[in-house]
Amino acid sequence: MDSNFIILLFLALLIAFIIYFFMIFNRLQSLRNGAEATLSQIRVAMKKRLDTIEQLVESIKSYARFESRTMERIIQIRSGIERAGPRDLQRIEAESRGVLGSIYAVAESYPNLKTSESVIMAMNAIREIEDEIARHRYTYNNIIQEFNTMRDTYPSRLIAGGMPKLDYLSFEEDELRQAGYLTSEEIEPRRPEVKWNE
């Protein structure tokens, strides 16, 4: 073999490796940026939900004497959203669902309140925002799964090197409890009962 051919082959392999390295590195960075962007969308949706909960509280105030502590709690939760990471968002999610649960409990106590147009509109808006948060969480977790898989598998693992694993968002326990499949005493979810028409 000609020495020029060997040098050209070596250079071609080196260039191919460099291109591959940058492609994998850029893909990992793209996934990380996508995860951060989706996390920002979740933060915006959670803030929007808290704003809507605040509007719901204002509507309920006219029917029931509502504690100012609830409003303070909403403001406190909202202030932590901007800098929240995945773990903090899980805590914020739990707190905001707690506030929302207490508001729904008050609404149940007042039949006129449940039929109020502003209360119905606010509750429907909250449901839509909940769906939006679920969609963003699904997208975020898919991005994180791809990032962590690339980080953990060869040969991209060699390129990912010191990049830390990213955390998933998991609010499933709250969703299972809300759907009635998990009570506070249970650790494992119950299977839903399925009844076939006989």
Image: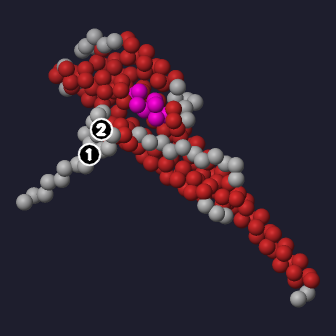
Q: How is the image coloured?
A: secondary structure
Q: Which residues are magenta?
A: 89-96
Residue at 51% from the left image edge and 32% from the top image edge: 88
Residue 165: x and y in percent read 60, 47
SS at mark 2 in the image:
loop
In the image, farthest residue toward the right: 3
Q: Is residue 21 above or below residue 50?
A: below
Quadrant position of residue 149: bottom right
Report crowding for label 2: few under 14, some 14 to 19, many 20 or more residues within 10 A (C-alpha).
few
Q: Are marks 2 and 1 in contact (CB under 8 Å)?
A: yes
Residue 91 on the magenta segment: yes
Q: Quadrant of the N terminus?
A: bottom right
Give me the disc on residue 158.
Answer: none
Q: Amino acid at mark 2?
A: Glu
Q: Which residue is mark 2?
A: 186
Quadrant position of residue 7: bottom right
Q: Which residue is mark 1?
A: 190
Specify whether 21 is left or right of 11: left
Residue at 58% from the left image edge and 30% from the top image edge: 83
Quadrant position of residue 9: bottom right
In the image, farthest residue toward the bottom: 1
Residue at 70% from the left image edge and 53% from the top image edge: 161
- Comparing 102 with 120, the one in front is 102
Q: Is residue 128 visible?
A: no
Q: Is residue 126 above or below residue 112?
A: below
Specify whether 163 is left or right of 3: left
